[in-house]
Amino acid sequence: MAWQDFKMRAANDKDDAPVAPSPSRPAVPALHVLSGSRHGETVDPPASTAPASIPAGDIALLYEAAVAAGMRRGLSREEAKPVSLSILRATLANDPRLAKPSAPGTCAVCGQPDANKPLLPFMTGRAGVFTWLHPGECHREHQARQAMAIDKCIARARVE
C-alpha cells in the first residue's frame, strides 16, 4: 500500500478502538492516551510539567496503536514503523505537557520583552495559554528544544 493511500485512509478513519486494559490501566481509546482524555474526561496538566511527565508506557502504547492501525490498513509491521514514528512525533509535538508557556509580553526563549521585535503567541494545547516567542532565532531555538524533548521522550519509551 502506498504511503499516500495510507495517509488518506488515516485521515478518514476514526481510529478510536479501545486499548486492551491491563491490571493497572483501564481500557482507554488509543488516540486519547497522550491527550489526557480518559473516558470522556479531559485533564489539563499543570503549566510547570516537564517532558518527563509523559509516562514512557503511554508513549509506547500510542506508538504500538499507530503501528497496529498501519497494519490494519495493509502495511507490514516494518512498513508501518516509520509512519507510526512520524505520527508519534506529531502527537508529542502537540501534547500540552510538553508546552512551555510564558508570560504575555515575554519571550519563552530569551526572556526579553517585545521592545524592538514583536512577540507571537503559539498555542500550548490549553485554552488561553500561549508560548510567546520572537520570530526568527527564538522560534528556531524553541523548535530545536521541542525536538530534543520529543527525542528524549521517545528514547525513554524505548520505541523502535
Image (cartoon, grey):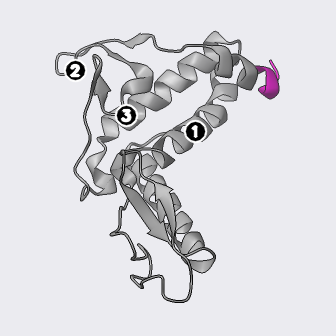
Which amino acid type is shown beneath numbered disc 3? Ser
Q: Could you tell me the amino acid type at mark 2? A: Arg
Dividing the picture into quadrants, the one containing residue 33 is top left
Q: Is residue 50 left or right of residue 69?
A: left
The residue tagged 1 is 85
Q: Residue at x 22, y 50 (%)?
A: 46
Question: Is residue 160 something that shows in the picture?
Answer: no
Amino acid on which disc 1 is placed: Leu
| Residue 35, percent from left and from top | 37, 34
Q: Is residue 43 above or below residue 12?
A: below
Please name whichever residue, 133 or 35, is drawn nearer the observer in this view of the structure.
Answer: 133
In the image, residue 112 sits, relative to residue 41, either above or below, namely: below
Query: In which image quadrant can residue 102 be found?
Result: bottom left
Q: Residue furthest left?
A: 24
Badge 1 crowding class, 10 Å Cα cut-off, few under 14, some 14 to 19, many 20 or more, is: some
The stretch in magenta equals: 1-5
- Magenta stretch, overall SS: helix
Position in image of residue 96 (x %, y %): 37, 47
User: Mark 3 and 2 residues: CB-CB less than 8 Å, in contact?
Assistant: no
Name the side, left or right, on which 56 lies relative to 93.
Answer: left
User: In percent of the image, x 50 and y 39: which residue is there?
Assistant: 91
- Does dot 3 land on a helix, a strand or a loop? loop
Residue 78: quadrant of the picture? top right
Q: CA distance from mark 1 to mark 2?
A: 23 Å
Residue at 49 percent of width and 62 percent of height: 121
Q: Which mark is residue 35?
A: 3
Q: Position of residue 101 (x, y in %)?
A: 35, 62
Q: Quadrant of the N terminus?
A: top right
Residue under label 2:
25
Say whether residue 103 is magenta.
no
In this rendering, the label closer to the viewer, 3 or 1 = 3
Mark toward the start of the polypeptide (3 vs 2): 2
